[in-house]
Amino acid sequence: MKLSDKEQLEKTIAQTRDLLEHLENDEIEDAQELIDTLARDGDEDLFIEIGKLTRRLHEALNSFQLDSRITDIAASEIPNAKDRLNYVIERTEEAANKTMDKVEQCNQLADVIAKDSEDLLSEWQKLYRRELEPGDFRKLCKRIESHLEKNKDSATDLHAKLSDVLLAQDYQDLTGQVIRQVITLVQDVEDSMVHVIKMFGNMDGYAAAQNEQKVTKGAEGPVVNKEKRDDVVSGQDEVDDLLSSLGF
Amino acid sequence: MKILVVDDFSTMRRIIKNLLRDLGFTNTHEADDGSTALPLLQTGNFDFLITDWNMPGMQGIDLLKAVRADEKLKTIPVLMVTAESKREQIIEAAQAGVNGYIVKPFTAATLNEKLSKIFERIEG
């Protein structure tokens, strides 16, 4: 048990008196033993002091590391994350446009095939109704032949364009990786901030803020955690219900 | 039928224009926010307005209010196509005089259904 300064002083005075007494009485062995005890007591205090210093040094080093981590995050990782997220916007926009280009071209091809087939079909039905002149039949055969040839090419073309659409989806992999990196950074920032709050702020306030329901005003874009919110609709059906309840 | 599509994302404008074309509406024009849309509306003789809500510059809800406050434009049908899904916002749009409200992501069938409903009401 650690003695108070006053107790320590009294103890040391008593020990010194005992030591003098031993020396005056020529009790050398007893004196030696007492000197050893005094020396040991001194060591113990020294160790306690060293222990305290070590802890303070450790804390100082820790907070220094934290400082350099925050500096690093602010100086390079956040600007880097902005670049990464811009990359995501660019890649997704590029993929969307590429996909829509190809889909529009496919639609045009499909429209042409549908129109040509419809025209041919009405000619073909004339044949059944015996409305074709003998010369017309030869023309119809020619048209059917060229239609089939054109369709064969269109099908190859459609296949190639659909493969391009398929390939354009590679943005998912690339942007997914980049977004995951940014999520890790956000996690690091959160950890650093919580550490700072622990060292300099109050954890009660932090805990209270965690439980707070945040209310946003005005436009906020897509709501990603709809199941956790009761102020948003879950889909078009709920929009329709709400509007009809308002008399729409 | 001359239609103005207002959205800050060109991909979304393109999706809506494509769906409209499939429904037979080919006379479509674009603007990227309310402040560019409003002068177009005032001079362009548009018959229909489709707008997003959340845009930089002038937001869709403010465009809707400006349209309803404009003597020349106030009867133009307005369809909102937006990711904004708070009940409070849908009510605000309804009170501001919106004719239809579609939440993103949406389907071609939903767009078709809301458009026909709006036209039915106008013609009926």
Image (cartoon, rainbow, N blue to C red):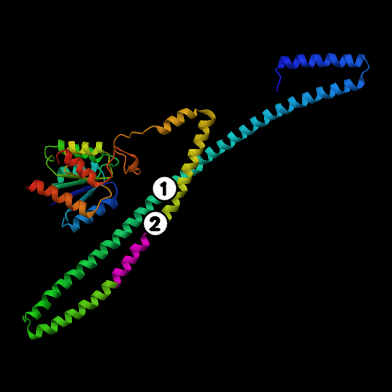
Q: Is residue A160 magenta?
A: yes
Mark 2 residue crowding within 10 angstroms, few (<14) / some (14–19) / many (20+):
some
Asked whether residue A48 is in view, the answer is: yes
Q: Give yes or no for contact between labels 2 and 1 (Cβ–Cβ under 8 Å).
A: no
Residue tagged 1: A85
Task: Check disc 1 and report its element: helix, strand or loop.
Answer: helix
Q: Position of residue A213 (x, y in %)?
A: 36, 33
Q: Is residue A108 left or right of residue A140?
A: right
Q: Residue at x 84, y 24 (%)?
A: A36
Task: Check disc 2 and report its element: helix, strand or loop.
Answer: helix
Real-space CA distance between mark 2 and mark 1, rounded to the nearest whole angstrom = 13 Å
Q: Quadrant of the C terminus of chain A?
A: top left
Mark 1 residue crowding within 10 angstroms, few (<14) / some (14–19) / many (20+):
some
- In the image, farthest residue toward the right: A26
Q: Position of residue A51 (x, y in %)?
A: 69, 30
Residue tagged 2: A171
Magenta segment boundaries in residue numbering: A156-169
* Towards the viewer: A67 or A29: A29
Q: Residue at x 18, y 41 (%)?
A: A243
Residue under mark 2: which chain is it in? Answer: A
Q: Position of residue A158 (x, y in %)?
A: 29, 69
Q: Amino acid at mark 1?
A: Leu
